[in-house]
Amino acid sequence: MLALAKRLEREAGRRGGARWGPRTLDVDILLLGDAVIDFPGLVIPHASMAQRRFCLLPAADVAPEAVVPTYGCTLTHLLNSCTDPLEVIAL
């Protein structure tokens, strides 16, 4: 799955320099059922998703009652508790 995400980024012409900087495309694996994975280069659930409204909003749209195993609560709960001030525009 990680290889597919990286391939999609490359094929879409991902450009971006600095880590956490602007880029043309960023594919992240947020959840994988109730799996908890912590390998070099791959952490699932995504380590920062609870602090990022732009991750939580679309994820909660797709699976509002999905439980994030490292937090023990739903995506909806994390979204409602998120203090990220950035506005997310749903398309």
Image: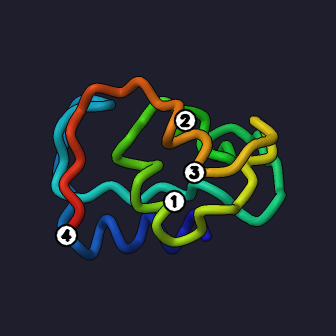
Upstream in sequence: badge 2 or badge 4 = 2
The residue labelled by disc 3 is: 76
| Residue beneath the point at 77% across and 65% down | 33
Question: Mark 1: which amino acid?
Answer: Ala
Question: Mark 4: which amino acid?
Answer: Leu
The residue labelled by disc 2 is: 50
Q: Are marks 1 and 3 in contact (CB under 8 Å)?
A: yes
Upstream in sequence: badge 4 or badge 3 = 3
From the viewer's perspective, is residue 38 above or below residue 14?
Answer: above
- Between marks 2 and 4, how big is the CA–CA gap? 21 Å
Upstream in sequence: badge 2 or badge 1 = 2
Q: Nearer the viewer, residue 14 or 77?
A: 77
The residue labelled by disc 4 is: 91
Upstream in sequence: badge 3 or badge 2 = 2
Q: Are marks 2 and 1 in contact (CB under 8 Å)?
A: no
Upstream in sequence: badge 1 or badge 4 = 1
From the viewer's perspective, is residue 46 above or below residue 71?
Answer: below
Instruction: Tell me where residue 13 appears, x and y as whole percent.
Output: 18, 66
Q: Secondary structure at mark 4?
A: loop
Instruction: Tell me where residue 20 appears, x and y as whole percent.
Output: 31, 31
Question: Mark 3: which amino acid?
Answer: Thr
The residue labelled by disc 1 is: 60
